[in-house]
Amino acid sequence: MGRNKYTMIHLIRTGEYKQRISLALKLFRVNKYLGPLINFRYFVKGFLIAKKMPKTKVLFLIYTPGKVGTASLYYALAECNIPVFHTHSHLFAEGFYFFYTYFRTSTKIIAISGKRPILDQAISDFCQNISNYTSPWYLDFPRHSETEISDFFLEKLPFYKNEKSGWIEKQISIIFKNDDFETLLEGPLTIIQNKKNLQLWLFNFHDINLSLHRISKKILLMTNRDINIKHLNASIDKSTSVIKDIIHYRLEIDETYCRLIDDVLGA
């Protein structure tokens, strides 16, 4: 089985890890000062975009982690000229909600988000973005076999536990802050709402077809517009589906990674 030359084992054997650590420490020192400025930049960006949104009674915010099937919903809303914005950023959302909390309180904001198992989400995200991995830390897709690419994913898998866990909890705290809210179930949808015109429609990725159907019906009742949701990013259409199948197969037969799966999914 081929291995990529930038594995941790290779770095330790050659001593290159010392150079990598030195560079990482330098970047960390810089980021210590730039980080707050970058965070504030995203907050301001969210505030300014919210300010530019049209004044309307209802505004949809596709505010969600990546790879949960909401891009299709965003385009369907935009094509029908229904006010909508799409973001994966908590910092952006904080600026967005800050504007509507203090400057446009009459607008009802409906955030829509999906939940997907962390491991499944990580595999989908990795496969879709393979072509963007061009630095020496990653794999250059055209030059490596599917097995080598799956090797690389398995090496970085433990990091997804910390990167992806707690996303929805953070989202709820940004939308509702310290307000009281109630949770309702409407078929496959979980609707969380407070008394200040804020709602979160939360669906399970594994019920996505039923969920999107339910969402489209609710939007029809609210806006009198019948949206046509197309699955733009269906994995069956992706050239990387072979790599995804290899990763799933290897995870099933490797006991080490089976234990790792339990850790990741238990986050």
Image: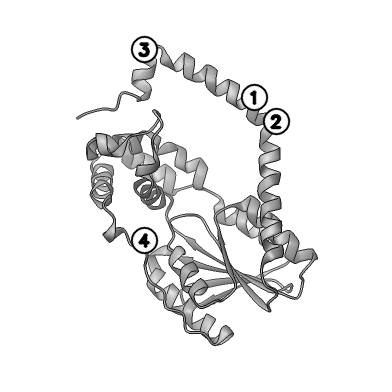
Q: Earlier in the sequence, mark 4 or mark 1?
A: 1
Q: In the rendered image, which residue does mark 4 sit on?
A: 233
Real-space Cα separation, disc 2 to disc 3, in angstroms: 32 Å
Q: Earlier in the sequence, mark 2 or mark 3?
A: 3
Q: Position of residue 259 (x, y in %)?
A: 35, 40
Which is more toward the observer, 184 or 197?
A: 197
Q: Residue at x 62, y 52 (%)?
A: 90
Q: Amino acid at mark 3?
A: Thr
Q: Earlier in the sequence, mark 3 or mark 1?
A: 3
Q: Residue at x 59, y 21 (%)?
A: 26
| Whether label 2 touches label 1, CB < 8 Å | yes
Q: In the rendered image, which residue does mark 2 sit on?
A: 33
| Whether label 4 touches label 1, CB < 8 Å | no
Real-space Cα separation, disc 3 to disc 1, in angstroms: 26 Å
Q: Residue at x 68, y 46 (%)?
A: 41
Q: In the rendered image, which residue does mark 3 sit on?
A: 14
Mark 3 crowdedness (10 Å alpha carbons): few <14, some 14-19, many ≥20: few
